Image (spheres, grey):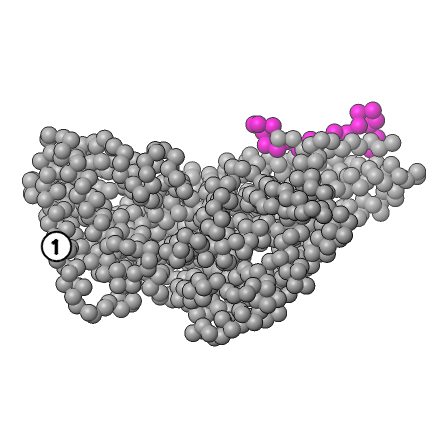
């Protein structure tokens, strides 16, 4: 009789995951192998405390993705450990004399020790980093991981300065990495001491340690930023789109953009693909619970009389992004990413980006809006590994918007992205797992495009059977099938598993990663950047006018109003109908930003949809001390620059107009601001400064309209290079720069919290859940 009882995995509220190993209390003598299991259990308990309690506390919120990867490896170790115990107990129950302890122990130890050593190595590295960060915290240094900035080998280190330095007089950044620290510990101590002493002289000094250990940027020596030349902050800028917030290294993420006609089955394909990667056979999938990343709803017919069954499966809480009620409209309402962690040996992450379908019955305007949304979504990525075009086999004609979609992709991303285009076909069981009659139509269409080098061949074409996944879900809904049908679905499943593996192998080994930071310039990309700059420019001009009015009243004033943007952490909107109560600052009445929760509808008010406008951040306000003469000259010059830039940008938008842009957004924005200020004047008697502000804004609008008419009468068009340079120049100004950072932060927060779903690998988690019943 074994002295070993089965382990139990529990989750108490306060003390981590609580790994417990229960020996048999009736006996005290354990065999060698059982002693080994007990030793590993003790080690796993220690790992659990380190991973789920110590490290998150010691790292102060840093390296969250690294901790998540370690947690996944921990679960894998536990899973393998539990399997070995279960196998050992089965052998004991079926072998009369018992197994050869030494031989069995060696086999188990070899496999378990390997993965435990991997976990131990990661934990030792993380704990060493945690101790270093805590030592920095003790010296009042803020730790910053430069790996989150995606600096490349060819970048200038001043890019980091643009991100971190807010005040050249009071910010100091010590740049180093683990190798430099290890090779020259004395120099590190000297530099830390030097900055600590400098802070004693200037208590306002903000000290940052910038860690270059996890970036491809090669730091040759330790250094302190800013340099002694003390570069003016006005000359520092952050690129509008800085895809740096994610801590996952570029090479660790495989980004796949999924494009297809409305109704082709993109969401079903994602669900099916995840299961094909997880379960190698249909029998294995049926013995477990299907992974459903996206809610499923479809009709299936069975039996001789074709009885209809409505099948629904998945979490109803995820239905906000899926609309099954309007036939012909794209079911997927917004782009959404589905993140899958690949097998233990690969250690990479697969991100599949589901997109709204083209060919929407609401018309070509909706298709344009959908494409605009797709481009804005991928604008925050650093790279794409593949663009997957999803098609049905045996169609009689391709959707009319197919060509437009491909043309726009190549225009925005550049012609070289054609090498990363792949073709996937769904429901190919009826065409013997081939593209069928769609193939010649597709070849003809690709040959008619201006860019002729889009490959379409066996190597980059994949044929799947999504019906096998539908069968799997239908079985979960207790729908009966006959033996012949089951055999067909089993064959379809095996074919789709093979295609899924070939699909991933092709991306890994045959395709080069396509950088989205390759300096390719396009009209659509410039439009995206300008649209994000509209509110920052308008709010900057309104606030500059407030401060110029303060200067005109008191030329000696040294107190000015400063904008303080704060990124929102959810999709939000303003409602023009809902009343806001203004507050007073420096004798100006100011309307507070009232952000409503908004996705496809407003959950804060019941006002009509067209009264809502999307926002990324809210503004608060502070008082800034500065020299009056110097500040007044800067503000006047900046107001002129912003006014001229808004005319250039509006002219560019209206002359390269997409159907989704119907009116001049800068002019509309100025009119909205004037309406807000007039409403304040009507509601409050002590409104002299706001009346002045209305007058200045109306003058600004008149000048804007006059200049725009002159611009439109001149047939000369600014070239794309000029617009890009204009965008870069405007984004350098701190009042714009800070609002743009808030926009980017909001988009990253929403992507992580609302537009990205992490799929748990069922083959690991299912075992863990089952073990709680031991």
Residue 282's x, y, as percent?
71, 50
User: In the current view of this chain or complex, which residue is farthest to the top?
Assistant: 26
Residue 442 sits inside the magenta stretch: no
Residue placed at 93% from the left, 39% from the top? Answer: 97
Q: Position of residue 342 (x, y in %)?
A: 61, 52
Count of all numbered marks drawn on residues in the image: 1
Q: Is residue 670 left or right of residue 764?
A: left
Give the secondary structure at mark 1: helix
Q: Residue at x 43, y 49 (%)?
A: 245
Q: Which residue is mark 1?
A: 703
Choose between 503 and 138: the one closer to the eye.
503
Image quadrant holding the N terminus, namely top right
Work out whether 681 lies above or below 716.
Answer: above
**Residue at (76% x, 42% y) in the render:** 84
Q: Badge 1 local density, few (<14 within 10 Å), some, or many (20+)?
A: few
Is residue 772 something one can see in this rendering?
A: yes
Residue 194 visible to an observer of this rendering:
no
What residue range appears in magenta?
12-30
Place residue 395 in its image quadrant. Answer: bottom right
- Name the spot of residue 141 as percent of width and height, x first: 39, 42
Q: Which of the two residues, 501 or 463, is positioned nearer the viewer here?
A: 463
Outermost front residue: 305
Is the C terminus in the top left, top right, bottom left or bottom right quadrant?
Answer: top right
Identify which residue, 170 or 202, lies in the foreground. Answer: 170
Q: Residue 686 in the image: state x and y as whole percent.
A: 10, 31
Residue at figure coordinates x 82%, y 27% from the top left? 28
Residue 26 is inside the magenta segment:
yes
Q: What main secondary structure does the magenta stretch of the protein show?
A: loop
**Between 75 and 43, which is closer to the camera in this rendering?**
75
């Amino acid at each position: 009789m074994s002295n070993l009882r089965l382990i139990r995995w529990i989750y108490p509220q306060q003390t981590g995951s609580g790994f417990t190993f229960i020996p048999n209390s009736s006996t005290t003598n354990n065999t060698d192998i059982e002693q080994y299991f007990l030793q590993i259990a003790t080690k796993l308990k220690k790992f659990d405390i380190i991973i789920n309690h110590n490290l998150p506390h010691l790292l102060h919120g840093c390296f969250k993705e690294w901790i998540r990867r370690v947690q996944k490896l921990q679960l894998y170790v536990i899973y393998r450990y539990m399997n070995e115990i279960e196998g050992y107990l089965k052998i004991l129950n079926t072998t009369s004399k018992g197994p050869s302890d030494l031989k069995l122990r060696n086999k188990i130890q070899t496999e378990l020790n390997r993965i435990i050593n991997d976990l131990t190595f990661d934990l030792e590295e993380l704990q060493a980093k945690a101790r270093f960060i805590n030592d920095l915290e003790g010296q009042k240094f803020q730790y910053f991981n430069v790996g989150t900035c995606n600096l490349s080998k060819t970048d200038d280190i001043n890019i980091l300065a643009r991100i971190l330095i807010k005040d050249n007089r009071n910010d100091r950044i010590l740049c180093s990495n683990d190798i430099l620290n290890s090779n020259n510990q004395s120099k590190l101590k000297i530099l830390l001491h030097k900055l600590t002493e400098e802070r004693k002289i200037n208590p306002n000094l903000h000290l940052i340690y910038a860690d270059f250990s996890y970036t491809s940027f090669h730091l040759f020596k330790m250094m302190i930023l800013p340099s002694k030349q003390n570069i003016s902050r006005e000359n520092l800028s952050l690129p509008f789109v800085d895809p740096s917030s994610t801590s996952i290294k570029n090479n660790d993420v495989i980004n796949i953009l999924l494009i297809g006609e409305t109704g082709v089955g993109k969401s079903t394909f994602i669900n099916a693909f995840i299961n094909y990667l997880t379960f190698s056979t249909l029998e294995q999938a049926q013995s477990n619970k299907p992974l459903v990343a996206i809610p499923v709803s479809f009709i299936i017919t069975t039996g001789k009389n074709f009885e209809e069954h409505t099948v629904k499966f998945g979490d109803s809480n995820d239905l906000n992004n899926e609309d099954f009620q309007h036939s012909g409209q794209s079911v997927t309402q917004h782009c959404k990413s589905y993140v899958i962690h690949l097998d233990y040996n690969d250690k990479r992450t697969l991100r599949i980006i589901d997109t709204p379908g083209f060919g929407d019955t609401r018309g070509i305007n909706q298709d344009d809006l959908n494409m605009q949304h797709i481009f804005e979504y991928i604008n925050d990525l650093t790279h794409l590994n593949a663009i997957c075009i999803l098609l049905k086999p045996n169609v009689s004609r391709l959707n009319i918007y197919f060509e437009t979609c491909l043309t726009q992709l190549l225009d925005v991303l550049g012609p070289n992205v054609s090498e990363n285009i792949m073709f996937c076909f769904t429901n190919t069981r009826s065409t013997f797992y081939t593209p069928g009659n769609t193939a010649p139509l597709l070849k003809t269409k690709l040959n008619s495009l201006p860019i002729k080098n889009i490959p379409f061949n066996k190597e980059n074409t994949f044929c799947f059977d999504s019906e096998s996944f539908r069968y799997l879900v239908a079985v979960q809904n207790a729908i009966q099938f006959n033996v012949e049908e089951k055999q067909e679905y089993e064959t379809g499943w095996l074919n789709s598993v093979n295609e899924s593996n070939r699909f991933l192998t092709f991306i890994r080994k045959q395709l080069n990663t396509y950088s989205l930071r390759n300096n390719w310039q396009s009209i659509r990309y410039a439009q995206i950047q300008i649209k994000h700059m509209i509110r920052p420019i308008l709010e900057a001009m309104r606030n500059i006018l407030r401060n110029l009015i303060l200067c005109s009243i008191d030329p000696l004033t040294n107190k000015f109003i400063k904008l303080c943007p704060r990124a929102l952490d959810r999709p939000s909107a303003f409602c023009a109908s809902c009343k806001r109560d203004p507050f007073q600052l420096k004798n100006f009445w100011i309307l507070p930003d009232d952000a409503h929760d908004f996705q496809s509808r407003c959950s804060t008010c019941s006002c009509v949809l067209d009264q809502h406008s999307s926002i990324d951040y809210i503004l608060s306000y502070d008082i800034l001390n500065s020299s009056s003469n110097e500040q007044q000259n800067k503000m006047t010059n900046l107001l002129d620059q912003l006014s001229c830039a808004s005319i250039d940008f509006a002219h560019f938008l209206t002359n390269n107009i997409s159907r989704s842009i119907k009116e001049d957004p800068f002019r509309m924005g100025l009119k909205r601001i004037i309406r807000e200020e007039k409403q304040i004047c009507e509601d409050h008697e002590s409104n002299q400064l706001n009346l002045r502000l209305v007058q200045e804004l109306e003058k600004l609008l008149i000048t804007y309209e006059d200049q725009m008419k002159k611009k439109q009468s001149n047939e000369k068009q600014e070239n794309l290079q000029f617009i890009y340079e204009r965008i870069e120049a405007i984004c350098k100004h701190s009042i714009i720069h800070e609002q743009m950072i808030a926009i980017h932060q909001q988009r990253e927060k929403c992507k992580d919290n609302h537009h990205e779903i992490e799929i748990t690998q069922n083959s690991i988690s299912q075992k863990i859940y089952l073990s709680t019943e031991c």
